[in-house]
Every structure is written in C-alpha cells, then in structure tokens.
Image: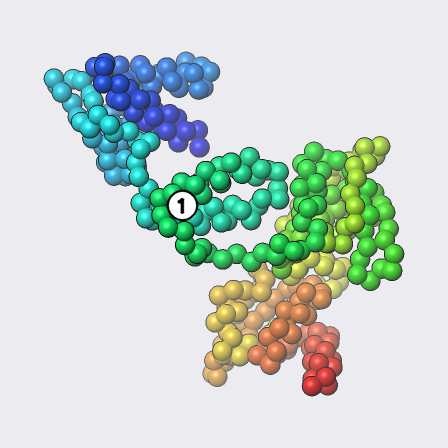
Amino acid sequence: MAQNKNALIRYKTIDKCLQNKYRRWTLENLIEACSDALNEYEGRDFNVSKRCIQLDLQLMRSDKLGYNAPIVVYDKKYYRYEDENYSITNIPLTENDMGILSETVEMLKQFKDFSLFSELDGIIQRLEDKVYSEKTHQTSIIHLDKNENLKGLKNIDVLYQAILKKVCLWITYQSFKARDSSTFTFHPFILKQFNNRWFVVGRKNAKEPILTLAMDRILSIDKNLAIPYLDEDFDGYAYYKDTIGVTVLNDDQIQEVELKIDKNNAPYVITKPFHHSQKVIDRLANGSVIIHLRVHLNLEFDRLILGFGDSIEVLKPKVLRNRIKRKLIKAASQY
C-alpha cells in the first residue's frame, strides 16, 4: 500500500512539474522534485533513483494507468507535455469507469450507519456529483437487499463504538418471548449480520455464557463506565464455525447431517453451499445428490430445510428427520 501511495505521489509530482511550461525539466530535475515530495510525505530522507523516474515516465505515457500522457523530450534532455493543457487529473471517465463508480456509490451507501464510514459521506456525494454530471442517471445494476424500516439500525454505530473503545454497556432488552423488558450489563464483542438482520454478541459478565442479542429488540443503550470492560479474546469465526445463522448450541448438539437434494435444486445447493462443511458424498442416477454437513441442529437450520419444501429430504440424523417430518405434517394440515 505504501509503495502504491509513493508511486501516486511521484506521478502527481511529475504531472505538476510538466504542467509548468515556464521551466525546463531535465530528468535530474524530476528526480529532485519527486525526492522532495516524498521527503515531505514520509518525514525522512528519500532518494528516488533515476531508473524509478524513467519507469514512471514510461508508465505515464502508456495506457496501463489510463493516463496516455503526451510526454515528449526536446533538445535531447528536457521533458514537457506536448499538449500544454494536459494533466493526469483532467482525464475524462470512461463509460466503464462510470458504471463501476455508480455501483461503488450504491454499495458504500449500505454502510452509512457506521461512523467508521461517516467520513465517506462527502466523498460519496462528490462521486455521485461526478458520475451524474457526466452521464444520464440510470437504475443501479447491482441490487443489494436492505430494509430501511428495520428497527434497531440506529444502534449499530453505538455498539460498534463500544466494541472499538472497549466500553461496558447498560442494555434494556425485550425478546419476542419475554412479557417484560430487562436491563443488564453487557460486554459487546462483535456485530453479526444474518438474513438481513443485525445482532450483537457478548457476555453479561465473565461467568455468563455468550449471548446473542437482536438489535431490533434492544430498547435502550447506555454506557456503564463503572464496570471495566471484559476484554476477552473472542473469535467470532471459531464461535460460529459449526453454526448456520446465529443460534449456537452445545457441542453435543452438533450433528453429522445427510440431506438428499432433488435434481432441480442440486445445482443451487452445490454452487451455494448451506455451510462450509458441506460435501457432496453421492450423485444418484436420477440427478439427485446427497450432501453431508456438520452443524448445530438449530432453528435457522430447520427453516433452511423447510424452505426447500419437497425438494429436500433429511436422511440423517433421525432426530432431525423426525423433527422436520412433524413440522411438515403440521404445515400440511393447515391446507
């Protein structure tokens, strides 16, 4: 990253020099100017080599960087732009550039609730102005699922900052099953998103188990500075490695699962696996496949299976097969 930044500083310095038509620029002059610019940026002595500037000039002349700079040599030693009005900062955006910028703007907007991205607001606005000033507004090609009406999104940044700054919180929470709300101390470790819904994962205290709270069920959040933050080395990837969704069960509820997928849905399940442990263990003559997974038998997994209707059959374990069977019978009885 630093090397790329230094290269960009050199290109901009060379560009600034060659725009100055009232001075004649030798290769040594350009080397000195670039060294001075990098010295100022790095805060230390920085000597740019002759070979480096020669390569920079070559790259700027080419279309590899998109510059195609009209750099010419005159009197056998002086450099200048053949077009006096040229600058690498004045290069018009191509149609492809516009398309990429448009979609980038749309994707960046998904993170507007995080203060981490708050400084991007102005950049995003300027990007939009640039894009739409140079082309007609058109519908976004990339569509990302989002729900602006989802409750709890306002809490994302508060929780993010608490995790970042290691601050203990007072949280008032009411689950869908609880008749009344409760207020408790909470040490947030990570934020997790699943199925277009946000959660915060942490502990009430060192003796309590890991707790996952849905953000849309949080009624209020306050800092609890009286209690030191429980600075636990929590690994979210390790914690959720055997889980589909957010409900992590006991280790004894991790099961070896076998599912049969019919031929119409097999390609979808193969190309978009249910879980990282998924493996195809058999391909049947009728086009169906049998897959194996090692996961918690939680509610999210049940819903995933039920979503495939008659296209999927649970082969193992028996406890999951019977549970899905009961739910399908109950569902069928309503029709």
Please tell me whether residue 132 is drawn above or below residue 314 in the rendered image: above
| Residue 254 image offset from top left, x and y in percent | 70, 63
Residue 143 appears left or right of 151:
left
Give 69 or 235, whichever is nearer the viewer: 69
Quadrant housing the C terminus: bottom right
Residue in the picture at 56% in, 49% down? 110
Residue at left 58%, top 44%?
Answer: 112
Q: Residue at x 59, y 69 (%)?
A: 292
Between residue 228 and residue 71, name the one nearer to us: 71
Describe residue 289's horizontal placement relative to residue 147 as left or right: left
The single residue placed furthest to the left in the displayed view is 75
Q: Residues within 10 Å of mark 1 (few under 14, many from 20)?
A: some
Vertical placement of 96 versus 3: above or below?
Answer: below
* Residue hosting label 1: 132
Q: Position of residue 59 (x, y in %)?
A: 26, 32
Q: How many marks?
A: 1
User: In the picture, residue 217 is in which quadrant?
Assistant: bottom right
Quarter the N terminus occupies: top left
Nearest the camera: 332 or 140? 140
Name the residue at 20% across, 21% down: 79
Secondary structure beneath dot 1 equals helix
Relative placement, left or right, of 175 versus 242 is right
Instruction: Say which amino acid is labelled 1.
Output: Tyr
- Residue 262: x and y, percent? 53, 79
| Quarter of image, res 85 | top left
Task: Tell me if 2 is positioned left or right of 144 in this view.
Answer: left
Q: Nearer the viewer, residue 326 or 218?
A: 218
| Residue 227: image location, x then y, percent | 83, 34
Determine if residue 206 is in view.
no
Quarter holding residue 121: top right
